[in-house]
Amino acid sequence: MNDTNQAEHENDGVRVTRRLALHGGAALPALWMLSRLSESGANAYDVEALLQRWTERTAALVEEDDPDEEAHLLRLCADLSRVDPATFPPRKTVSFEKDGKQSGPILAAMPFLVLQFDLEPGAVIEAHNHVGWGFVSMGVRGEALVRHFEVAEDAPEPGVDLETTFLAREVASTVLLPGRTSSLTRSRANIHWFRAGEDGATFFDFGVNLADPGDGPTRFSAMEVADEPADAERRLYESRWLGNIYK
C-alpha cells in the first residue's frame, strides 16, 4: 500500500509543495533524508551564494582521498531543487556553436563549472562520455529528452577503434523541464545524449572535475547509437565510438 505525503514550506514569499509517494514504513526515514539533503538550502534562493557555496564544496571534495561524488551530486540536486533556474546569470560567452546548438560558461571556477546550452527545435547533442567529470543537467526553458548509457560489454577504448561495434545499455531516460535534473558520475551513466523538443530548449550543466578518471573512461569520445534496440527488454543498443567530433 502506498502513502502519499505532502510537505510544504514557505521561504522568501515562495511556497514549495513536495509530494512524496512512499511505501509503508519508509515514509519517516525518507522525509528525514529529504530534510537533511535540503538543510544546506537556507540561502539557496540566493544564486550567487549557491554558486560560491558549491565552488568551495567542490574544491574541498577533489582534495579528498576517496571523494564521494554520488553524495556530492545528490546534495547539489537538492540545492538546485530550491532555485528558480531563470534567476541564474546568463552565460558570459559562446564557446561552441554548431548545428543548432550553442554553449558557453556561466561560471568557470575549476574544478566547478556551470555551462549554459541553448538548442534549437529538434537539435541533438550526440551521445558522448566524460573523462573525470560528474555532471548534473538542469532544465531551464522548453524541454529536452536526455538519455544515459553505459558500455554493456567489452568494447574498444573510446575514440581509438571507430569501426568495431559493441553493445551499450540505456540506463536512464527523462525529459528535462525547467527545474528538473539528471546526473552522471565518472562511472555511472557516464554517456549522455540530448534532443530538444519542438520549441527548443535551454539547460545548464553543473560539472565537477576530478582529475583522476577513477573507474570511468580515460579518453573522450562521441558515440553512435542505433535507432532501434538490439534487445528491447534489456535496453541494449548496438553502438560504436566516433572519436572527438567537436574538434
Image (cartoon, helix red, strand yellow):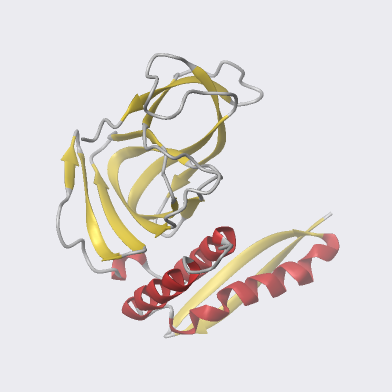
- Judge whether 135 appears above or below 192 on screen: below
Q: Is residue 79 left or right of residue 234?
A: left
Instruction: From the viewer's perspective, tell me whether residue 51 is left or right of residue 90.
Output: right
Asked whether 27 or 89 is in front, the reply is 89
Q: Is residue 236 above or below residue 22?
A: above
Counting from the top left corner in percent of width and height, residue 43 is at: 43, 84
Q: On the image, which quarter does residue 88 sit in? A: bottom left
What residue lies at 53% left-to-right and 42% top-to-bottom?
Answer: 189
Q: How far from the left and from the top, in percent, is residue 125?
A: 32, 36
Q: Residue at x 61, y 21 (%)?
A: 232
Residue 93 sits in quarter: bottom left
Q: Nearer the viewer, residue 33 or 55?
A: 55
Which quadrant would the N terminus be assigned to in this image? bottom right
Residue 184 % position (x, y): 50, 49
User: Please, is residue 222 above or below residue 189 in the view?
Assistant: above
Classify the position of the C terminus by image quarter: top left
